[in-house]
């Protein structure tokens, strides 16, 4: 499993601070991080550096971990005002053709055909065992076009998986083709000021655009793909923009917010998603974890539950009927914050699972974590214990999200 970004942030920030104090910043960071020359850079790289971004390797890219503000302050600012994230390391792609939806439904659990045009949903690419190859946002642009965003760290395996199945599908007469949007950048605008700020840059009435809605519209004079979604639990948007216009758009968003929306890095993005109770692929979900175990069985459409037809359907549908042997839960705890791989025990001290993500919540001012426990120990209020650095601390199961979601939905 990957180290959580929160932990990367703590380690990187501590190392950078130590090196700066000793006056050996450049040489030691080269040893601490991989060769910068091997890392890909987004269109906003120079903007990040100009604004004091502390750049770190992530999924083969040089990405900002944080800026001048602390990760805690940036997290709070997103929830009180807003944040602008560069998420151009994510991979956007389009499937087109009259059979694009039937093809995709062989690989994911979502009822893509049942989505209204220009709407999307979270889904899971599954393997033959029902495990998650990746969790992704899929948008049904129309009956012949699906837009997908997959995780940066999963890009290579996702694309290989899709391509291998596409070759077989097309060999049997299926009409589907794809385009990988490497010519575009992706910005995530999140927080309570996101809509009012973005509204100043488009003629589209954003008040009529709800959570998961998709539009192809002009923003700041440039044709963009706009989805009302995000990874923070806040209202917000993901904006796919031609890369040559990405910097101008980012600057315009920051200017129109009167500096209340701030550039925000991966560190705060991770703390925000944890507060929102959202999975980080590679930590909280992997190829041995089913959507049922992960607590996102709602991604499996009613029709898909009845018909199956996706990889691993037999395993997943059995778990839906009988229940899984383990479940993802959220927890509050005392003592030092639990981290990935911290042991979870029941009240008697018997090991029943482990933490997959954890940290100190900047907004709640308490420890929060999520992990997997044996079924029967997953109900809200169940008293548990977590083992952190060899010592045992009290914990209890709590409902997620930890911080109330504020998605913009019809009233």
Image (cartoon, rainbow, N blue to C red):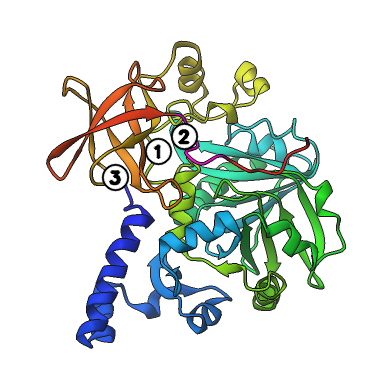
Q: Residue at x 60, y 50 (%)?
A: 230
Q: Residue at x 36, y 34 (%)?
A: 331
Which residue has dot 3 on it? 340
Count the labels in the image: 3
Q: In the rendering, at what x and y percent does residue 345 appear?
A: 22, 27
Left or right of 381, for residue 152: right
Q: Nearer the viewer, residue 281 or 220?
A: 220
Is residue 209 visible in the rendered structure shown here? yes
Residue 287, disc = 1
Q: Earlier in the sequence, mark 3 or mark 2?
A: 2
Q: CA distance from mark 3 to mark 2?
A: 24 Å
Residue 127, disc = 2
Task: Give the secondary structure at mark 2.
Answer: loop
> Badge 3, how many Cα within 10 Å: few under 14, some, many 20+?
many
Left or right of 59, for residue 227: right
Picture layout, residue 178 above or below residue 380: below
Give the extent of the magenta segment: 399-404
Q: CA distance from mark 1 to mark 2?
A: 7 Å
């Amino acid at each position: 499993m990957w180290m959580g970004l929160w932990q990367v942030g703590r380690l990187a920030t501590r190392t950078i601070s130590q090196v700066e104090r000793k006056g050996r910043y450049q040489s030691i960071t080269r040893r601490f991080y991989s060769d910068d020359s091997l890392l890909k850079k987004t269109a906003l790289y120079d903007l990040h550096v100009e604004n004091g971004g502390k750049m770190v390797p992530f999924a083969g890219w040089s990405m900002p971990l944080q800026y001048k503000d602390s990760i805690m302050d940036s997290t709070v600012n997103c929830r009180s005002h807003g944040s602008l994230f560069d998420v151009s390391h994510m991979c956007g792609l389009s499937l087109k053709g009259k059979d694009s939806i039937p093809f995709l439904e062989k690989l994911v659990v979502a009822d893509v055909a049942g989505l209204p045009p220009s709407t999307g949903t979270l889904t899971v690419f599954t393997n033959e065992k029902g495990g998650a190859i990746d969790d992704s946002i899929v948008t049904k642009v129309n009956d012949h076009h699906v837009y997908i965003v997959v995780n940066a760290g999963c890009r290579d395996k996702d694309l290989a998986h899709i391509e291998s199945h596409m070759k077989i599908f097309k060999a049997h007469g299926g009409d589907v083709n794809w385009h990988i949007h490497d010519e575009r950048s992706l910005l995530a605008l999140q927080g309570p000021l996101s809509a009012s700020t973005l509204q100043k840059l488009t003629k589209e009435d954003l008040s009529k655009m709800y959570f998961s809605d998709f539009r192809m519209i002009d923003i700041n004079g440039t044709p963009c793909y706009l989805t009302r979604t995000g990874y923070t639990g806040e209202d917000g948007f993901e904006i796919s923009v031609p890369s040559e216009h990405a910097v101008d758009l980012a600057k315009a968003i920051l200017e129109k917010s009167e500096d209340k929306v701030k550039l925000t890095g991966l560190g705060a993005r991770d703390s925000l998603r944890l507060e929102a109770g959202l999975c980080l692929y590679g930590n909280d979900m992997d190829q041995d974890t089913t959507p049922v175990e992960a607590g996102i069985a709602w991604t499996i459409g009613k029709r898909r539950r009845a018909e199956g037809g996706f990889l691993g359907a037999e395993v997943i549908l059995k778990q839906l009927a009988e229940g899984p042997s383990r479940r993802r839960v959220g927890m509050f705890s005392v003592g030092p914050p639990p981290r990935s791989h911290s042991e979870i025990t029941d009240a008697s001290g018997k090991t029943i699972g482990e933490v997959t993500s954890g940290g100190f919540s900047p907004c709640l001012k308490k420890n929060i974590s999520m992990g997997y426990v044996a079924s029967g120990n997953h109900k809200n209020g169940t008293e548990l214990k977590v083992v952190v650095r060899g010592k045992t601390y009290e914990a209890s199961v709590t409902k997620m999200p930890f911080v109330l979601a504020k998605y913009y939905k019809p009233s």
